[in-house]
Amino acid sequence: MLFNKKIRGSIWALILLSLGGWLLHNKIHPLSADGNPAFYLPFILGILNFILVPICFNFKRTAILAYLINGFSVILGTITMLHINLVALPTTLTVKYIFLNSNLPYICLLLPKLFIAQTILQFHYPTGTGRLFTSFWWFKHFIYVSIVYILGQILWS
Amino acid sequence: MMLKYIIRWRVGWWILHILVIGLTLYLGHLIRF
C-alpha cells in the first residue's frame, strides 16, 4: 500500500492534522494578495506538511528531512501564533481569554505533530539518535528559534 | 542515512544552521502583525 504498514497510522495522523490545520488557516485568514508572509507561509508550509513530509517520512533515507521540516514548522507556527497574541494583548488578562480567545487551542492542536513524528523516527532509528532530537533538544531549539525571530523583529525593522 | 551528514560540526550541520538562522531572521523581519 501507500505507506509502510508499521507507520501507516502515524503518517495518516500527521496528514490529517496538517490538512486540518491548513484548512483552518484558510478559513480564518485566506491567502491575501498583499504579500504578507503571515498569510502565505502557513499556506506553503501546510501543503509541504501534508504532501511532501508524509512521503519523505515513509523512507529511512529521507525521514530526517521530513522530521526536521515537520518539527521546525511546528516551532515556527507556535512562535508566530504566540506573537499574534502578544501584540494584541487585552488590558485585563482573564483565564477565559487565555483558554478560549487566544491562539492556545490552535497551538495545542499543532504540538501533537512533534510527538507523532517522534514515533515515526523511533521506527526508522530504533536504537535512537543519540543527543539529537530528544525533548530537551526540541526545547533548546524552540528557545534558539524564538531568540533569532525576536532579533529579526527588533534589529531588522 | 542522512543523519551522519548533520552531526554536530560537520559541513551539513553548518549549512543547515546558517540557512535556518538566516531564514528565521528574515521571517522575523518580514512578519508584522
Image: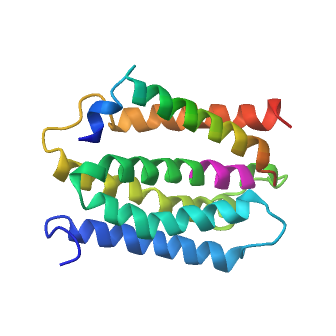
Side of B32 relative to A97 (left or right): right
Side of A40 relative to A9 (left or right): right
Based on the displayed image, in which of its 4 quarters is residue A70 positioned?
bottom left
Residue A22 at what x, y percent from top left?
Answer: 55, 72
Side of A124 relative to A40 (left or right): left
**Vertical relation: A114 (above or below) A150:** below
Question: As rendered, which of A47 and A114 lies closer to the eye?
Answer: A47
Residue at image location 80% in from the left, 50% down from the top: A87
Q: Is residue A106 visible?
A: yes
Quarter that holds the C terminus of chain B: bottom right
In the rendered structure, which segment of residues is drawn in magenta? A78-84
Residue at image location 34% in from the left, 65% down from the top: A54
Dominant SS type (magenta): helix
Residue A72 at what x, y percent from top left?
Answer: 49, 47
Residue at image location 71% in from the left, 35% down from the top: A150
Q: Is residue A102 visible?
A: no
Residue A99 at what x, y percent from top left?
Answer: 61, 62
Residue B17 at what x, y percent from top left?
Answer: 51, 31
Residue at image location 70% in from the left, 45% down from the top: B27
In the rendered view, how is the structure colored? rainbow
Quarter that holds the N terminus of chain B: top left
Q: Is residue A80 magenta?
A: yes
Based on the displayed image, in which of its 4 quarters is residue A28 positioned?
bottom right
Most distant residue in the front direction: B11
Q: Is residue A50 magenta?
A: no
**Vertical relation: A84 (above or below) B9:** below
Most distant residue in the top direction: B9
